[in-house]
Amino acid sequence: MERLEKAMRMTMLAVGVIGIAVIYFGFVYLQVNDDMGITMPWYFLISPWICVYFGLTQTQQIATINWFVNKFKWKK
């Protein structure tokens, strides 16, 4: 079972990284090629990061959440 979980995690990580490259290059292409009149919604830019997040180990996921909380916490 652990082997299957590791394979699924690596697959999610690979799909996420490839998705980031494809979607961001596509986004830049559509921004530069304005004459086509096609736009991409902003939430498409976040979707591959979800795959990357679920490709991380549980410890790395918790560290990522803590980093976001500390990054966006109001500092007095």
Image: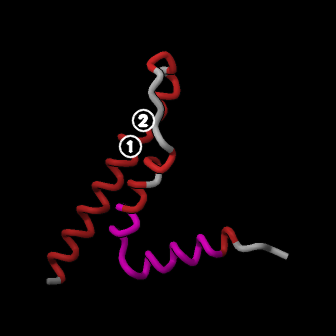
Q: Secondary structure at mark 2?
A: helix
Identify which residue is drawn at 34% across, 55% down: 16
- Kindly tell me whether residue 38 is visible in this rendering: yes
Bounds of the magenta segment: 51-69
In the depicted structure, whether residue 16 falls above or below residue 6: above
Q: Residue at x 46, y 37 (%)?
A: 40
Image coordinates of residue 67 in percent, x first then y, are: 59, 73
Q: Amino acid at mark 2?
A: Phe
Residue 42 picture location, percent across and down: 51, 45
Q: Quadrant of residue 76?
A: bottom right
Q: Residue at x 38, y 54 (%)?
A: 48
Left or right of residue 13: residue 43: right
Measured in 3D between alpha carbons, the distance from the residue under mark 1 to the one under mark 2, in whole angstroms, is 6 Å
Query: Residue at the location (48% across, 20% down)?
Result: 33
Viewer-proximal residue among 50 and 60? 50
State yes or no: residue 54 in magenta.
yes
- The relative height of residue 27 versus residue 52 in the rendered view (above or below) is above
Task: Name the residue carrying label 2.
Answer: 25
- Against 40, residue 61 (above or below) is below
Q: Amino acid at mark 1?
A: Ala
Where residue 8 sits, quadrant-wise, is bottom left
Question: Relative to residue 2, is residue 45 depicted above or below?
Answer: above
Would you name the residue on which mark 1 appears?
21
Residue 55 locus on image (x, y percent): 33, 67
Q: Is residue 29 visible?
A: no
Residue 21 magenta: no
Direction from residue 7 to residue 67 in the image, left or right: right
- Quarter holding the N terminus is bottom left
- Secondary structure category for the residue under label 1: helix
Tell me if mark 1 has few (under 14), some (14-19) or many (20+) residues whose alpha carbon lies within 10 angstroms of its own. Answer: few
Q: Main secondary structure of the magenta part?
A: helix
Quick check: marks 1 and 2 in contact, CB under 8 Å? yes
